[in-house]
Amino acid sequence: MPNPRILVTRPAHQAPDQAALLADLGFDPVQLPLLEIAPVTESDPAFPLLKSRIMDLDLYHTVIFISANAVIAGMDLIDQYWPQLPVGIEWLAIGRQTALKLHEFGISATQSPAGYDSEALLALPQLQQMKEKKVLIMRGEGGRETLAEQLSQRDARVDYADLYRRSLPHYTSGQISSTIGDTPLAAVLVTSGEAVSNLTRLITDHRLGALKHTTLVVPSERVARIADELGYTRVITASGPDNQAMAETVLSTIDMDDRT
């Protein structure tokens, strides 16, 4: 019997690690990134504002990194303009992977032990009394507004550093057929609501409606709700968005299906 085929949809620079872990566990991973990450560059009209945010880094009380992608893009810019990090900043991270990525750059960031999203971070004690405090949110353009809205309601002064843009990569019918259409999938792994939306676009464009009934592993209840609203019928929530949590969820799910 062939190994169960698992669709990995992380961005291209992150997918290989997840695929390698799944292969080690006895699965047949195939990669189809649903998000393309394009950093804002100096030629971009949005760059002057982004640069000013980075240049003013020492004026912020709190800097929040939304994701590991935000860390990679953000620290690249910070390193250019700050040979030494400014002191006195409270560094925060959404999720364990984001905090670990910051640690690679020598930054000890606080993460919420309660979860991997904005709501969990907002519950931290240090974000309760925010009157007149300046907060910089390091993120991709067009992300969720929950964090900024809630902090503003707590009287914080919030700015964004929009570091990159996300888009759905272009795929030919042949690429879709070789990864999704030719062999049945045991599960699809998605790590954000935007990735679920992009998957839905591909399903519609390439008439792959059966995928709506394939096991969809998601990282949070929020993403699960998005998937439910889009018509996915078998949605399973992992304990987190990291590779290990997602892989363990696939392993337990596939094993359960095979033995019952």
Image (cartoon, rainbow, N blue to C red):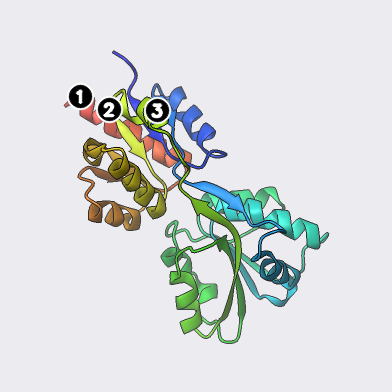
Q: Position of residue 84 (x, y in %)?
A: 82, 61
Q: Disc 3 residue type?
A: Gly
Compared with 88, 16 (above or below) is above
Q: Quadrant of residue 251?
A: top left
Q: Please report the residue visible at 47 percent of the width from the left and 70 percent of the height from the top.
A: 147
Residue 153 shows which numbered tag?
Answer: none
Residue 227 makes an appearance in the image: yes
The Cα–Cα distance between marks 1 and 2, rounded to whole angstroms, is 6 Å
Residue ID for mark 3: 174
Q: Please report the residue visible at 65 percent of the width from the left and 53 percent of the height from the top.
A: 73
Who comes first in sequence, dot 2 or dot 3?
Answer: 3
Decide: marks 1, 2 in contact (CB < 8 A)?
Answer: yes
The Cα–Cα distance between marks 2 and 3, rounded to whole angstroms, is 31 Å
Residue 123 makes an appearance in the image: no
Q: Where is residue 161 in the image (x, y as percent from the top left)?
A: 62, 66
Q: Of discs 3 and 1, which sits in the foreground?
A: 3
Find numbered disc 1 in the image and state the secondary structure of the residue it sits on: helix
Q: How crowded is mark 3: few (under 14 residues within 10 Å), some or many (20 or more)?
A: few
Residue ID for mark 2: 255
Of the pair 47 and 260, the residue shown nearer to us: 47
Residue 128 in the figure: left or right of residue 257: right
Residue 180 in the figure: left or right of residue 100: left
Q: Disc 1 residue type?
A: Arg
Who comes first in sequence, dot 3 or dot 1?
Answer: 3
Q: Please report the residue visible at 47 percent of the width from the left and 30 percent of the height from the top.
A: 19
Query: Which quadrant is home to the N terminus?
Result: top left
Find numbered disc 3 in the image and state the secondary structure of the residue it sits on: helix
Residue 259 shows which numbered tag?
Answer: 1
Q: Position of residue 226 (x, y in %)?
A: 30, 56
Task: Report the label total.
Answer: 3
Q: Position of residue 260 (x, y in %)?
A: 16, 27
